Image: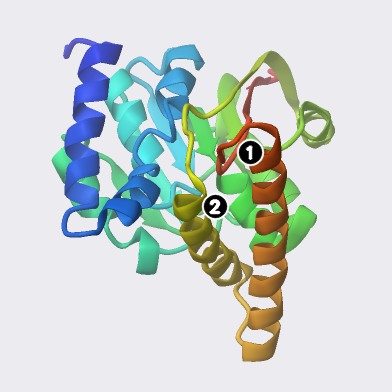
Amino acid sequence: MRRRVRDPEIIAREQTLRAWLTSGRDDVLQRIDGLDIGWGGVQRWGTAKMPDVGTGRHLDFACGVGTFLAQVGWRFPNAELVGLNIDFAGPHEPIRGLLLRAGVQSDLVRADARRMPFGDDAFDSASCFLGLQDIEIGFGDDGVRAAVWEATRVLRPNAAVTLLDTFSFARFDRLLRESSLQVTDRAERALAVRWSRPVAERAIELYADGWADQARVSDLKERERIRSRAARRLKADLARQLASTGFFVPFGPVRMVVARKRA
C-alpha cells in the first residue's frame, strides 16, 4: 500500500506541475493560469478536510482540467479514481498530460454530470471542486440540482460527497435537502492570492471569455452579451476590492460541504 503524501510534498508537486502548465507564458499569464494548480491553497486544504477515500472507488465529477483530481490522488494514493467531465477539449485538453506529470492514475469519462453513465451505488465517495458553478452557467439551477441528484444516485449508502464551490451555505443546504444527503461537515477558506490591478484586469478578460464558453451558446451576439455582463460584474468587484484592500482576490471564499447518503 502506498503511503499518504503530506502537505510539504504536495506543495512541491504543485510547484512542479504549475511550472509545466504555464511554461512559455509571460509573467502575468503564469500568475493567472498558475492559479489552476492548487487554487491558492484551497485544493490542498479541501483534500485534507474531506473524509478519507482510502482504497475505495472515488468519483470527481465536473473535473475540468483535473487539478483537484490530481490533489485527491496525491492525498489518497490508494484510491481508484474516476474523473467525469462534459468534455476534454479546449481548456480541459491538458488533463491527460497533467495527470501523467502529477503521477496520478484515473479513468476519464466524458459525460454530462446531469446524466452520469454509472449504475446506482457505484462509488464509495465523490467530490466536485468549483464544477457546480460551471454547470450553473451552462444549464442553470436545474442543471445543478440534476448533477447533485446524480451524484447521490451513484453513491453507495453511507458514502460521502464533498462539494467545494462559491455557493452560500444556505444554497448548499437547499440543494442537499432535495436529495437523500445529510450534511456532516462544512467549512470555508479564502484563497491565499493577492493580485495587483494589471494582473486582475488581464484575468478579468480571460475569465469573461471563459464564462461565455461555459454558457454554451452558439449565437455570437448572445455570447458577446454574456461575456460583457460577466466582465462588468468582475470589474465592479475589482473596483470594490482595490478600494477596500488594495489588492484583488479572483474567487472565493470557497465553501466546502460534506454530506453522506442516507442508508
Q: Would you say 179 lies left or right of 159 here?
A: right
**Quadrant of the rendering where the C terminus is positioned:** top right
Q: Residue at x 58, y 41 (%)?
A: 251
Q: Amino acid at mark 2?
A: Met
Q: Amino acid at mark 1?
A: Arg
Residue 123 higher or lower than 160, as above or below: below
Q: Residue at x 25, y 31 (%)?
A: 14
Q: Residue 212 has which mark?
A: none
Q: Would you say 6 lies left or right of 239 here?
A: left
Asked whether residue 79 is in view, the answer is yes
Nearest the viewer among 56 and 251 is 251
Q: Position of residue 162 (x, y in %)?
A: 56, 26
First in residue order: circle 1 vs circle 2? 2
Q: Would you say 244 lies left or right of 158 here?
A: right
Which residue carries the number 1 mark?
153
Question: Do residues under tags 1 and 2 come within 8 Å of each other at their CB atoms?
Answer: yes
SS class, disc 1: helix
Which residue carries the number 2 mark?
116
Residue 159 higher or lower than 191, as above or below: above
